[in-house]
Amino acid sequence: MPELLSRRAALRGLGAAGLLAALAGCGVPAAYVPEDRRQAPDRSDRDRALAFSNWPLYIDTDDEDEESRPTLEAFTRKTGIRVRYTEEINDNDEFFGKVSPALMNRQATGHDLVVVSDWMAARFVHLGWAQKMDRSAQSNVAEYLDPQLRSPAFDEGRLYTVPWQSGITGIAYNRRALGREIKSVKDLWHPDLAGKVTLFSGLDESFSLLMQGNGTDVTRWAESDFHRMCDQVENMVRKKHVRRFTGNDYTSDLGKGDVLACQAYSGDAIQLRADNPDIEFVVPEEGGELWAESLLVPNLARHKANAEALVDHYYDPEVAAELAAAVNYVCPVPAAREVLAASPDKETAQLAENPLVFPDDAMRRRLAVARDISSAERPALAKRWNAIVGL
């Protein structure tokens, strides 16, 4: 089985992003850009184009031509706006490091629209590096955005960001090889899994689910909750219970049988299960993390209105359904469910009933959007976590 590409890249130490976030937290004025200095003259009317950067394998493609992206092409036919689409975001910190010199120096990046994980989007918002979108021009977003994703702590009311896709952090395991069910985060620490468990190496990717296993309300966790979780993980590392910490390579470990249980993402689990029906994905009884990767318009973008039009295009339920059928993550447009359910293709219609693509009420009650790590907290918390992980 080929290695799957995870949508949430692992955090590799503090890096440039952590340094800038720490500087902003200390009140260094060079990083922050006030609201009235974020816009450039918009060329959208006279230049019907935009530059859109995304992660690899994170959009629909034509079965006969992998270079063809039907939903983008439909947007161009409808509006006349050409989209220069690049798959250049392979790691949140790496991309941040690429664009931060320009943004810090109040220069254009050449990007009109980008997709980053919400914990990274929080940094853009806190630094004043994302422009407020014109919701009056985005009727689909206003009507169809998933209510559970409408107001994260870092961007109340979703003024600066809009989810591209969403997902769930839970536990994947090999039911046949393990010989029992996993229902709780605490089940990961059972002696029969010694040396057969992996956790995410990224701080932002891993902490919420592990805290939830301790009964923590991750919407308002405290540093004491974080250190309690770290003490627990540190103990398991010392006992060699945790095989290793991973990025997206956890999928190959589980697929090959090198591990029996691991932290996992819902979208990856759907693909894994298609290749191996013994793989199960569970949202633990204590709860799971609902996360998003979001679209934002960087400062000084030259085609802001065109970018906003493309965002709204993807919130048309018909378009959202087409994208959801291709990528299999949690769709941020619940109304797309009815579109998929009506599909004459049996496999496509079945996606409408998959709670990992369209969470039902019972599933939603077990999901939480975690409070993000503040710039003031990040240096100390990253240092503690990275010491455990070995970064």
Image (cartoon, rainbow, N blue to C red):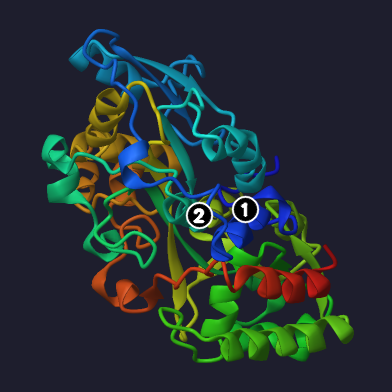
**Among the two numbered marks 1 and 2 on one chain, the one whose residue lies closer to the N terminus:** 1
Tell me the SS state at disc 1. Answer: helix
Q: Nearer the viewer, residue 307 or 90?
A: 307
Residue 365, given in percent of the width and then of the height, sits at: 31, 78
Q: Is residue 32 above or below residue 246?
A: above
Residue 116, given in percent of the width and then of the height, sits at: 50, 45
Q: Looking at the image, which residue sits at the far top?
A: 46
* Residue at which label 1 appears: 20
Image-based side of 34 in relation to 203, left or right = left
Quadrant assignment, res 340:
top left
Going by the numbered disc 2, the residue's amino acid type is Arg
Mark 1: few, some, or many residues within 10 Å (few <14, many ≥20)? many
Residue at 51% x, 83% y is 212
Going by the numbered disc 1, the residue's amino acid type is Leu
Image-based side of 215 in relation to 205, left or right = left
Quarter of the C terminus within the rendering? bottom right
| Number of marks in picture | 2
Q: Mark 1–mark 2 contact, CB under 8 Å?
A: yes
Mark seen at residue 123 = 2
Does residue 10 appear in the picture of this structure? no
Residue at 64% x, 34% y is 98
Residue 191, given in percent of the width and then of the height, sits at: 78, 90
Tell me the SS state at disc 2. Answer: helix
Residue at 54% x, 62% y is 27
Residue 114, given in percent of the width and then of the height, sits at: 45, 35
Q: Is residue 67 above or below residue 255?
A: above
